[in-house]
Image (cartoon, grey):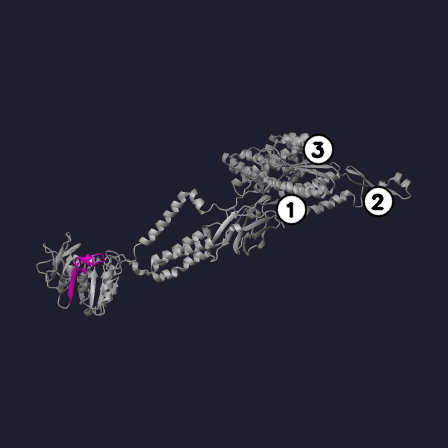
Amino acid sequence: MYITGWTVALVAVGTIPAAWAQDRTFAWLWLLGALALAGLDALLAPRPRVLGVRRTVPGSVRLTERTATTLDVVNTGGRRVRATVRDAWQPSAGASANRHRVALRAGDSVRLSTPMLPTRRGDRDADLVTIRTTGPFRLAGRQRSLEAPATLRVLPEFASRKHLPSRLARLREIDGQTAVQLKGAGSEFDSLREYVIGDDVRSIDWRASARRADVMVKTYRPERDRRVMIVLDTSRLSAARVGDAPRLDASIEGTLLLTALATKAGDRVQVSAFDRVERARALGTGGPAVMPALANALATAEPALVEPDWPAIARLVQSRLSQRALVVLLTTLDPSAVDGGLLDTVAAISAKHAVVVASVDDPELAALEAGRDDAHDYYAAAAAARTAVESDAIAARVRELGAEVLTALPDDLAPALADRYLALKASGRL
Amino acid sequence: MSTTELHHATQGPGVVASARRRPLAIVAAVLFVALIATLVWTSRPEDYVTLSTGNASEDGTRAIAQILRAQGVDVRQSDTLAGARVTSPATSTLVIADSTFLADYQRDSIAEYPGDLVLVRPSQELLDDLDTGLRVTWSLDQEIVPAQCSDPDAQAAGEVQQLEEAVIAGARSTAETCFENGDGEAAYAVIDQGERRIAVLASWPTITNEHLDERGHAALGLRMLGRHPTVIWYVGDPFDPSTLTWSGSGDDGAAPPSELVANPDFLPPAFGPVMFMLGMTVAVAALWRARRFGRLVREPLPVEVRASEATRGRARLYRRAQASGRAAAAMRARAAMRMGRRLGVPRSAGSEALVSAVARAAQRDPRDVHRILYGDAPAGDAAFMSVIDELDTLESEVHRP
């Protein structure tokens, strides 16, 4: 049961006759009368049970994109029902305008649409559907909540996809769809075609030209079907907030851009999110199915407040990769990572594979280091300098082990990683 | 269109079942309703002033006022002495009930009043000021006494019961006392002062609602009060500072300036019920807003800590420990790292190579550069800050385009 604002108005109107009667007993009687009328109204209101609801949810939505979930309401009773329906979702699902007024004749149904603008990645759960039926006097009614489970999967934003066209253009340059094409490291034989003016004479295949009447040139393309494995560290350091989002979100952006690029380049990408156990994985798919599968897998990846198990990561990489591959470790260069065995893992992996260790820089550290306002700022600058020197030392030790190190601000990590991949591909070190 | 089943609200347990499950709640609800009902029905009537004509309870006088009105007497109650405004004292009866709270200037104004007076439950001061020569006393025996006087009203009443109080006539009193007991205590007295007649009803409960229908009480009361077509009724009120007014009194009834007291009657009579009703409106509005439209939805929030928190903590530690040497070393190492990178000096090269490269770039004395980059650890905040400022200057010189 609930009462509406009309009941309050009815009681308030009683002030006028109460002022005229100048009698408190009258005021009491008016109040009790109004409440009794509201109670009668609630009794006369249709039972919420006669309304059936059905939720329909779009499969998934990208973070910051709008969508709508629908709620079908069916009147299974024999009376006309006037009601308000609240389609409750958890706050980060961004379900605005989720209260709907409906008026349904017996047997009628209506489809309500609740606009959604999710503010967090992951699985956003629907809560109860609450139904308020209104009595004939609109003074009061009945209320009941019911379960109608539904889940909306919110995929990572992939804001870095704006960098994809320029990187694909670079990839095509390397790829040989542009005029200059030379055989070299990292390229493989593609096809024979007729010589046209402007082709490098060194690429003429004399044996093929002898067989044919025309002069033939060999064309090359970068090696394809290389393996790329991306390991996201989801341990406690990935939970730290850099700018507005945790480190993990920047890592996910980098993963998505690199995967999109490498898949276009014809390489096979597998992704694993790992701390002490594997939290998410995307492997074994190819072609256009890769990106949806990856976004889906990473949607629910959350940082865990545990130390990463670096030896287990080394074992995981070795078990997943049989041939030489590019292994990208998206982690944090922090002294504690060294104690935990980061260096041993990098050494173990880089013996067989090309390794890139990518880490998200904190823009706040740069701001701290530049602060010169008072004595406290000077000490903060010194502390930031100490942190920077330490990470630099770790980066130097990782480089000594033969791995590449990449540190970038959160927004720059994804394009920097893509550039590093293209550089490796161009130089044939993949 | 989805093919999933429709969800329905589950059937509640019903009123009877839930009552059986939680009997205490039902008992509490019944008690609450009973309490509210009791409060409503036993709430005292609006007027509960003793001897007031609006008071329907035992010590009120609504009954006798209604009888008088039925007999064609205009009974008007005034809350203040100033409100009496007796238009013709010759054809009016002024009733002063319960005069305990009257101040001396108020009693003086009553003493000057030319018309007939009825004093119910008079105070000793008022009797003295009106020069009655009567003395108030307690009447504890509740004797039933006959009239025993020549006053026709008293004779008509026959006998009354002495209740609460009585008066005793002094030696030089001109008052005719009626309903005397053996000790000379009278329930009623009449003083004829020529132009006016003062009736004193000391045994005041005789005209209250409770005792009016006993013995000769009604006859006495009605005859005493019904001598004139108009009755002005005043009940003593400690919050009334005004004086008596009548046509020709030459007074507007205002209290002397020094006697003004706060008077709660400045509020209109409807104020109480209106405030009560507004309060109830607020309570109902609270009920309206308090009912949630479905439960609050939980949001499982991830743990998020600013990444720079550890660095800030380290800064506070440096500061608290006054570790200026260690802090300066960190700044020097960082500056050397940056300048070395800028000038292309490898990390493996020694300090001398860096110093000479920096000195060349900044066009400074190498010893000066060495002092800035590898000098003694500064002691104290001031020295530490000056080292950093020197480092900043050096770096800006090196990074100059």
Disc 1 target residue? A159
Q: CA distance from mark 3 to mark 1?
A: 29 Å
Q: Are marks 3 and 2 on the same chain?
A: yes
The quadrant the C terminus of chain A occupies is top right
Q: Which residues are magenta?
A: B196-217
Query: Is residue A171 visible in the rendered structure shown here?
Result: yes
In the image, which is nearer the foreground, mark 2 or mark 1?
1
Residue type highlighted by circle 1: Ala
Residue A321, label in figure: 3
Upstream in the sequence, badge 2 or badge 1?
A: 1
Same-subunit check for callouts 3 and 1: yes
Crowd around label 2: few <14 · some 14–19 · many ≥20 (10 Å):
some
Disc 2 to disc 1, C-alpha distance: 40 Å
Chain on which label 3 sits: A
Examine the structure image and report whether residue B197 is included in the region drawn in magenta.
Answer: yes
Report the disc number at residue B334: none
Q: Residues within 10 Å of mark 1 (few under 14, many from 20)?
A: some
Residue farthest along the left direction in this orientation: B171
- Separation (CA) of disc 3 from disc 2: 39 Å
Give the mark nearest the N terminus, 3 or 1. 1
User: Residue A199 got which mark?
Assistant: 2
**Dot 2: chain letter:** A
Question: For residue B301, which quarter of the picture?
Answer: top right
**Residue B312 horizontal side relative to residue A27, left or right:** right
> What residue type is disc 3 on?
Leu
Q: Nearer the viewer, residue A316 or B190?
A: B190
Figure quadrant of residue B258: bottom left
Residue A14 coordinates in the image, percent (x, y): 39, 59
Name the element at disc 2.
Answer: loop
Label 3's element? loop
